[in-house]
Amino acid sequence: MSLPDEPFMRRALELAARGLYTTTPNPRVGCVIVRDGKIIAEGWHERAGEPHAEVHALRAAGELARGATAYVTLEPCSHHGRTPPCADALIAAGVARVVAAMQDPNPQVAGNGLARLAAAGIAVESGLLEAEARELNIGFVSRMTRDRPWLRIKTGCSLDGRTALPNGQSQWITSPESRADVQKLRARSCAMLTGIGTVLADDPQLTVRDFAIGRQPLRVVLDSRLRMPPSAKLLQTPGVLVVCAEENAARRTALEAAGAEVMCLPVNGRVDLMALLLELGRRGCNEVTVEAGAELAGAFARAGLVDEWVIYQAPVLIGDPAKGVANLGLASLTEKLCPTRVEKEAVGPDLKWALRFGMEE
Ligand code: AOF
Ligand code: ZN
C-alpha cells in the first residue's frame, strides 16, 4: 500500500463515524471511490437493514466505478444478511482495486469477502489504518470475537475520587460540559447498565436527551431482589430490562405491568455478570456503558470484565466520609487495577480519563 492511499482511508473513516450513534447492531462503515487520484463518490452505513457503505458509494459513482479503487473501513461482506453481499456489488460494478482497513470479524465474512474479490481478479489489500478502524468498531469486534459487548464504566467524581455523599447525594459533582459528554457516551451505547442502589438513590433515566438519534439505548437494571419501584423514572421510556437473582412473582408482575422485561440470571444469590453480558451479546449489544455506584462498578472490576473506564474528574474536593469510585476489595497493592493504556483530555473545567483494560493485542 502506498502513502497516497492513506488520506482516502482517513476520509472513509470520517464517513464511517457518521454512523456512530445509529448503525447498531451493525458496525460503522465508510467507503470512498477514487479515480485518477480524486474522490468520485462516498457512502456510509447508516442503519441496520439499510444499504451498506459500499452500496451507497457505488450508487453515487454509477458507471464511473468501472476501473476505480474503493476504500472501505471494513472488509466488504460476502454473505446475505439483511442486505445482499457488497463483494458481489463491487465485482458487478467493475471496481479494479479494493483497499480495506480491516477484516470483518463477523464469522460469516472473516476473509471471505476479500477472497471473493480476489477470485474475481480485483486487486485486494487490507490493513490500512487498521487500528483506527478497530477502535471505531471496538464493540462490534468484541461481540464477534468474545460473544459479549465492550464494557465501559463511566464515573463522575471529585479530585479526591468521591462520587457521592454518604446520604447518596451526587448531583452535581462534574461540570455541565462533562455531563454533555456523557450524553455522547450514552448515544453510542447499545445498552446502559446500572444497579438498584443508583435507581433508588438518584432515580435516573439513563436516556439520550441532548440530541435525537432515533433510538434509545436499552436500559438494564441489576436488581437481585426486584426492589425496583414500578414508579421509577427509568420506566417512563420503553426498553428496560430488570435482571434479578431471585424470583418474586408479585414484583415481577408489577414491573412487567409498568413495561419492564424481567429476567432472572442467578449465581450464588447475585446476578451472574458474565451470563448477563453474554445475554446482551445475544441481543446484539456492541457497546454497554455502566453508570453505577461503587458496589456494581467494583463487582464488574473484581470479575475482570471492565474493558474501559471513563472517569470525569472535577477539580473539587469532597473529602471523608464520602463514597469512592469502586469497592475493589484489594488485599494487597499488587492487585491494584493498572490500565494497559491511558488517555486524558480536558472537558470544560474537568479532566476526562479513559483507562483501557480490555482486548489489547
Ligand atoms: C459491509 N459494509 O457498510 C457494513 C457491513 O444484515 P446486514 O446485511 O446489514 O449485514 C450485517 C453484517 O454485514 C455485519 O454483521 C457485518 O459483518 C457486515 N457489515 N459490511 O461490507 C457495511 N455495515
Ligand atoms: Zn456489505
Image (cartoon, helix red, strand yellow):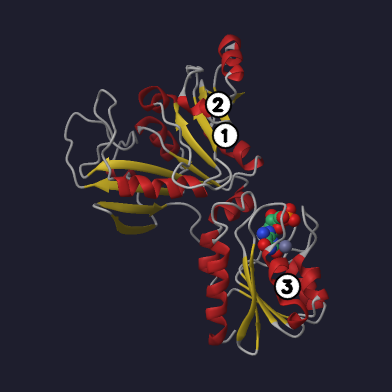
Residue carrying label 3: 58
- The answer to whether residue 237 is visible is yes
Residue 243, label in figure = 2
Which residue is rendered at x = 59% and y = 52% of the image? 22
Which residue is rendered at x = 33% and y = 33% of the image? 327
| Amino acid type assigned to the residue bearing label 1 in the image | Leu
- The mark closer to the camera, 3 or 2, is 3
Asked whether, in this view, residue 340 is left or right of residue 320, the answer is right
Outermost residue toward the top? 250
Determine whether label 2 and label 1 are within 8 Å by CB. yes
- The mark closer to the camera, 2 or 1, is 2
| Amino acid type assigned to the residue bearing label 2 in the image | Val
Which residue is rendered at x = 77% and y = 83% of the image? 66
Residue 276, label in figure = 1
Q: Secondary structure at mark 3?
A: helix
- Check the image and report above or below for 17 versus 249: below
Mark 3–mark 2 Cα distance, whole angstroms, equals: 45 Å
Image quarter for residue 348?
A: bottom left
Asked whether, in this view, residue 244 is left or right of residue 282, the answer is left
Expressed as whole percent of the image width and height from the top left, the position of residue 297 reads: 40, 36
Expressed as whole percent of the image width and height from the top left, the position of residue 218 reads: 56, 37
- Check the image and report above or below for 52 versus 301: below
Q: Earlier in the sequence, mark 2 or mark 1?
A: 2
Expressed as whole percent of the image width and height from the top left, the position of residue 209 reads: 46, 41
Q: Secondary structure at mark 1?
A: helix
Asked whether, in this view, residue 248 is left or right of residue 317, the answer is right
Which residue is rendered at x = 34% and y = 36% of the image? 326
Q: Secondary structure at mark 2?
A: strand
Q: Dot 2: few (<14), some (14–19), or many (≥20) neighbours within 10 Å?
A: many
